[in-house]
Amino acid sequence: MPEAVEEAREAVDRLYRHRVLRRRSPEVSAEAALRGARASAALAGDDVPLDALRRGEVSSPVVQGALRASAELGRLGSTWRSTPRQVLARVHTLAAVGLADEADIGRPRTGAAAADPLALGPAPSAEQTAARMDALFALVTGQTKAPALVLAAVVHAELAVLRPFGIADGVVARAAERLTLVEYGLDPKSLVPSEVGHLELPYAEGLRAYLQGTGEGVAAWVRQCASAVTLGVRETTAICEAMQRA
């Protein structure tokens, strides 16, 4: 596992040296965010063409929620380490419009979660979820020495399997992974759409490995997240190369 984490970090470092980023980093970040949002929506069951999304022709609430959540991340980063509970509530408020009852948006669920598109099985009870969420918040706000990628992998998996809101949790989980990668220093300019990588990998299988609760299962999921970051680097490198040719 440490080797995979280090390889992903080296891939991000190489990307950050790309000459296009000297002048056009904000443009690259915006395009990466668009592609990441599209991939996150696809993982939630609504796969749409990138060109249609770019033209504004997609009205799906899943896709629109992923876009809103992605667009908000830059404004939420500064509070992620200090008030993660409020940040997640805000991301869910954006991601769940049109999918959940208005009274439930941004609020932890009190009953069972909705049907899971990844077929991971029943979510823990609301009480069990609340306890594990408290532990997760303590991890995010604490002085962990874990690499950013490892912390991001745990944040992502816990939110995905606990389903704390009951609907749109996958989009929230993937947004939280990106926030962690940015705020804990691996990808400070938010250039790497890890969601694109997750879409190319056996996403549900990786989460099922994490659900086993074994050291091997958790390590397998962290390696998968490292691969997702590396694939995200490949996607952003392609964006940079296209801009350089234009």
Image (cartoon, rainbow, N blue to C red):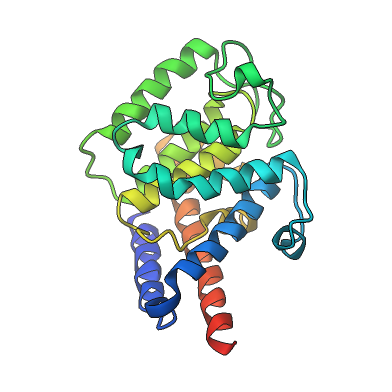
- 31 to 82, vertically: above or below: below
User: For the point 59% across and 23% down, which residue is it?
Assistant: 105
- 148 to 129, vertically: above or below: below
Task: Answer with left or right where residue 87 lies relative to residue 144.
Answer: right
Task: Answer with left or right where residue 64 lies relative to residue 128.
Answer: right
In the rendered image, the quadrant that contains the C terminus is: bottom right
In the image, 54 versus 2, the foreground residue is: 54
User: For the point 75% across and 51% down, which residue is it?
Assistant: 47
User: For the point 41% across and 42% down, which residue is it?
Assistant: 76
Q: Is residue 220 visible?
A: yes
Q: Position of residue 127 (x, y in %)?
A: 48, 10
Q: Residue furthest bottom?
A: 245
In the image, 213 versus 63, the foreground residue is: 63
- Location of residue 45 by image quarter: top right
Q: Position of residue 156 (x, y in %)?
A: 48, 40
User: For the point 54% across and 37% down, which residue is it?
Assistant: 172
Marker count (numbered): 0
Q: Position of residue 242 (x, y in %)?
A: 58, 81
Q: Position of residue 112 (x, y in %)?
A: 64, 14
Q: Is residue 212 visible?
A: no
Task: Answer with left or right where residue 28 lies relative to residue 65.
Answer: left
- 169 to 203, vertically: above or below: above
